[in-house]
């Protein structure tokens, strides 16, 4: 039987996974949740609640930076896709700047 603190820990971690962008969740959440569950069981078995607390401190620090970074990537990629940069082609009949400006 699982200790209530481990069940709560597992539930809270799954809630935190929902803060990641949807594409990240779809790809990694199913793998991340069982890994954290295993780590939390090991930490609790070896060191009790103190070990679990230490794991949570590290996990929360990593989670905060990872969520921010993943959202930055998600939003930046979306903006880049919306902006269509067309390269200059000579057949466009657009005159370049005179050499004095280049």
Image (cartoon, grey):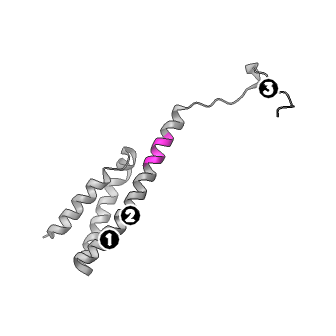
Q: Which residues are magenta?
A: 71-77
On screen, 29 above or below 7? above
Q: Quadrant of residue 48?
A: bottom left
| Mark number displayed over residue 55 | 1
User: Is 97 placed left or right of 54 in the picture?
Assistant: right
Q: Which mark sits nearer the N-terminus, 2 or 1?
A: 1
Q: Position of residue 71 (x, y in %)?
A: 43, 47
Q: Residues within 10 Å of mark 2 (few under 14, many from 20)?
A: few
**Taken as a whole, is the magenta stretch helix, strand or loop?**
helix
Q: Residue furthest front?
A: 101
Q: Quadrant of residue 56?
A: bottom left
Q: Secondary structure at mark 3?
A: loop
Identify residue for label 3: 96
Q: CA distance from mark 2 to mark 1?
A: 10 Å
Q: Position of residue 46 (x, y in %)?
A: 26, 81
Q: Secondary structure at mark 2?
A: helix
Identify residue for label 2: 61
Q: CA distance from mark 2 to mark 3?
A: 51 Å
Q: Quadrant of residue 85?
A: top right
Q: Which mark sits nearer the N-terminus, 2 or 3?
A: 2
Q: Residue at 26% of width from left, 54% of height from top?
A: 15
User: Is 89 placed left or right of 33 in the picture?
Assistant: right
Q: Residue at 36% of width from left, 44% of height from top?
A: 22
On screen, 36 above or below 73? below
Q: Secondary structure at mark 1?
A: helix
Q: Residues within 10 Å of mark 1 (few under 14, many from 20)?
A: some
Discs 2, 1 touching: Cβ within 8 Å: no
């Amino acid at each position: 039987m699982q200790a209530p603190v481990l069940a709560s820990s597992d539930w809270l971690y799954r809630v935190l996974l929902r803060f990641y962008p949807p594409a990240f969740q779809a790809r990694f959440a199913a793998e991340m949740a069982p890994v954290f569950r295993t780590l939390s069981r090991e930490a609790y078995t070896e060191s009790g609640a103190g070990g679990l607390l230490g794991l949570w401190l590290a996990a929360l620090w990593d989670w905060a930076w990872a969520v921010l970074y993943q959202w930055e990537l998600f939003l930046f990629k979306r903006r880049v896709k919306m902006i269509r940069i067309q390269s200059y082609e000579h057949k466009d009949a657009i005159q370049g700047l005179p050499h004095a400006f280049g």
